[in-house]
Amino acid sequence: MKVLVAYATSEGHTRIIAEYVSKWIEQEGFEATLYDTAQGVDVADFSSYGAYICAGSVHFSRHQPALERFVRAHLVELTCKPSALISASGSAGSPLPQGQVQAMEYVTAFLSRTGWKPLMKVAVGGAVLYTQYNPLLRMVMKGITRKAGGPTDTRRDHESTDWPALRIFVQEFLSRAGSKSALEPVA
Ligand SMILES: Cc1cc2nc3c(=O)[nH]c(=O)nc-3n(C[C@H](O)[C@H](O)[C@H](O)COP(=O)(O)O)c2cc1C
């Protein structure tokens, strides 16, 4: 089975997530193609893939418009074949319970805006890249992150992605996707 891993990123962390996901797919014996949705919606031989994983991150409560355009453009295939959403956000990495709730609200809002009903979805902690932000953004992000119970040491970057949990998610998706006929509609 060929799996397309399409991603959108603003500061680069979701690209790293997508790269890991692709590597794990290959390690499970499948073929993975990485695609940056910033390139547009036209993917060569889109319908030749047996499953799709779309990953993006949250900024000011929304996922990237490029990811939204991509999902809308391919809604039929994403509905008819196994598909999954990986959503990275600061909230999903928060140690506070309301952070998880907020992270899933971003996911729900994205899915209802696009009309996409993926087979599986997950919210994962993202990265706070203090060293890469400009001084104003660093200050703003420090305030937001403090409220969310996250790290406030601005001298370094912080990552809150639970890699083992994400890998298990990918393995479960592959197992469910592999056991379905490629053309069987998924609920
Ligand atoms: C300007 C900015 C706005 C953000 N807004 C939110 C937000 O509204 N909610 C949230 O949970 N995380 C927010 N985050 C955290 C990002 O989702 C997190 O840094 C993620 O890892 C970014 O992924 P990327 O590097 O792939 O763009 C924000 C980060 C930045 C830099």
Image (spheres, rainbow, N blue to C red):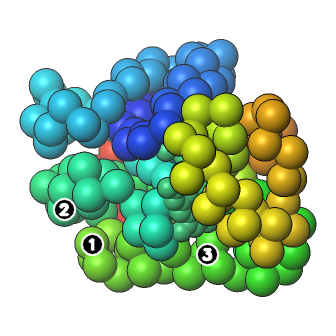
Sequence-first tag of 3 and 2: 2
Asked if the residue at tag 2 contacts the one at tag 3, i.e. Cβ–Cβ closer than 8 Å, the answer is no
Q: What element carries label 2?
A: helix
Q: Is mark 3 within 8 Å of ligand 1?
A: no
> Which class describes the residues within 10 Å of circle 1: few (<14), some (14-19), or many (20+)?
some
Q: Which amino acid does label 3 sit on?
A: Met
Q: Position of residue 132 (x, y in %)?
A: 59, 33
Q: Which mark is residue 134?
A: none
Whole-number angstrom distance, CA of label 3 to CA of label 2: 20 Å
| Residue 7 appears left or right of 80 | right
Q: Mark 3 points at which residue?
A: 104
Q: Mark 1 points at which residue?
A: 114
Q: Which mark is residue 72?
A: 2
Asked if the residue at tag 2 contacts the one at tag 1, i.e. Cβ–Cβ closer than 8 Å, the answer is yes
Q: What residue type is labelled 2?
A: Arg
| Vertical position of residue 87 compared to residue 45: above or below | below
| Residue 147 appears left or right of 69 | right
Q: Where is residue 54 in the image (x, y as percent from the top left)?
A: 41, 47
Sequence-first tag of 1 and 2: 2
